[in-house]
Amino acid sequence: MFSTTTKPYTSSTLISLSKISSISKPKSWNIQSSINHFSLGGLTTSSRNLSVSCSYSSENGSHFQRSSIQGGEAFFRGVLESMQSVYLNRNPTAKAILDLVHSVENNSLCYDHLAFRTFGVNGYGIDSLAQFFLDYGYTQRDELRFPGKKLRALWFSPPSDSFSDDGSGMNGPLPRIFISELLVDQMSPQTQEIIRKYTESSGNGQKYAALASSLGHLTWDTPLYSEFQQLARESEYAAWTLVNGHALNHVTISAHRLKTHLKDIKKLNRFLEESGFRLNSEGGVLKVSPDGLLQQSSTVADSISFQFSDGITESVPCSYIEFAERLVLPQYENLPHTEIKEFHRRDGFEVASADKIFESTSKEQVSRAGA
Ligand code: OOG
Ligand code: NI
């Protein structure tokens, strides 16, 4: 029942939607009220930044987390907040689950990662979004390849010197970033033509991927329904990206950093299913890495009514929410529980699991959700 919305949106209504949402603070979403002044008031932002920037922790010994955010952190988090507002406004299932987990967890949860999709052509690929994260101190990590889906992905780890390590959501420990791209050159000529038409006619839109994501606006023109269908026949990822652009594809709740019994992802999954939410069943609900240390699950995507440029209004898949539990690495198994930090746990991503998580927006999973 939480899985569909019927309100049509067009590219022009999206902007006003996201403007309104950042001004009228949603009542049920506790973190937002404390963060909204990031996007509304420069003065509040800078005083907050000054007072907290001296309290960051230096205890994180992770080999890879050496980079620095060096100022601008309040702005950076404000952008993440705006991306999240767009996501919560469009995806009632994600919002309902975040509200539910928040209420059980006494209004505190952390994000493991955020994920985005891109077209790997004309400068629109991974780099178009990655630059924003690199500029704010993130470090590029591993590449993942998905030859069957004609995709590749990179993930990025956050800087170690950010404030609010004990905050919640976008105000908590900074999340990893997972960005994928469609290998457009490997698509059929018809599909390539459509993707090139929209990316080429967008001016320098590829330079503003992060801005587009935080506004919830496409950088290219609204496509025709027949073009969406052509892409959907060949790559559900391509069709998704044509209508969702740089919008947040999902946020991932860090299960092991929850405080209640829900920190066990199997219990979290059961709790969500018993609360009426449907989880992506592709290859089994729980996706486990070969070493057993990374366990992931996700919902199936919400659908949203999209008005195509030829006047046709059709339901298209939107975003979903994911859950990840990272187990303690064998060499740290004997550490007292209270001393275990994030860097003592399994890091990174897993190709075989990711391959199935991509299916959270597939027609097969999405139509199952409404069944
Ligand atoms: C990304 C799917 C992969 C993960 O955590 O492995 C993923 C997507 O659907 O764009 O999120
Ligand atoms: Ni993910």
Image (tube, rainbow, N blue to C red):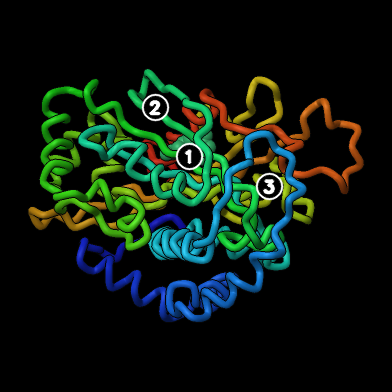
Q: Identify the amino acid type marked 1.
A: Phe
Residue 315, image x, y percentages: 27, 52
Which element type, helix, strand or loop, lies under badge 1? strand
Is residue 369 among what the camera can see? no
Give the image location of residue 172, x and y in percent: 63, 59
Residue found 22% across the figure and 50% down from its top: 205
Q: Residue at x 41, y 49 (%)?
A: 132
The percent coordinates of residue 221 (x first, y second) are 14, 52
Identify the residue at horizontal 49%, vertical 81% (top origin): 43
Disc 1 to disc 2, C-alpha distance: 11 Å
Pointers 1 and 3 in contact (C-beta within 8 Å): no
Could you give the CA–CA distance between mark 3 and mark 2, rounded to whole angstroms?
26 Å
Q: Indicate yes or no: mark 1 CB to ligand 2 under 8 Å.
A: yes
Residue type at the position of mark 3 = Ala
- First of labels 1, 2 by sequence position: 2
How many labels, in total?
3
The quarter holding residue 344 reads: top right
Position of 127 relative to 259 (above/below): above
Disc 2 marks a residue whose amino acid type is Arg
In the picture, measured across the screen, residue 135 lies left or right of residue 192, that is right
Instruction: Provide the residue designation for mark 2.
Output: 152
- Rendered view: 154 above or below 311: above
Mark drawn on residue 178: 1
> Label 1 to label 3, Cα distance in Å?
18 Å
Q: Quadrant of residue 179?
A: top left
Among the two numbered marks 3 and 2 on one chain, the one whose residue lies closer to the N terminus:
2
User: Does the Cβ of the disc 2 residue fall within 8 Å of ligand 1?
Assistant: no
Q: Which residue is mark 3?
A: 255
* Label 2: how many Cα within 10 Å (few below 14, some 14–19, many 20+): some
Crowdedness near tag 3: few (<14), some (14–19) or many (≥20) residues, C-alpha within 10 Å: many
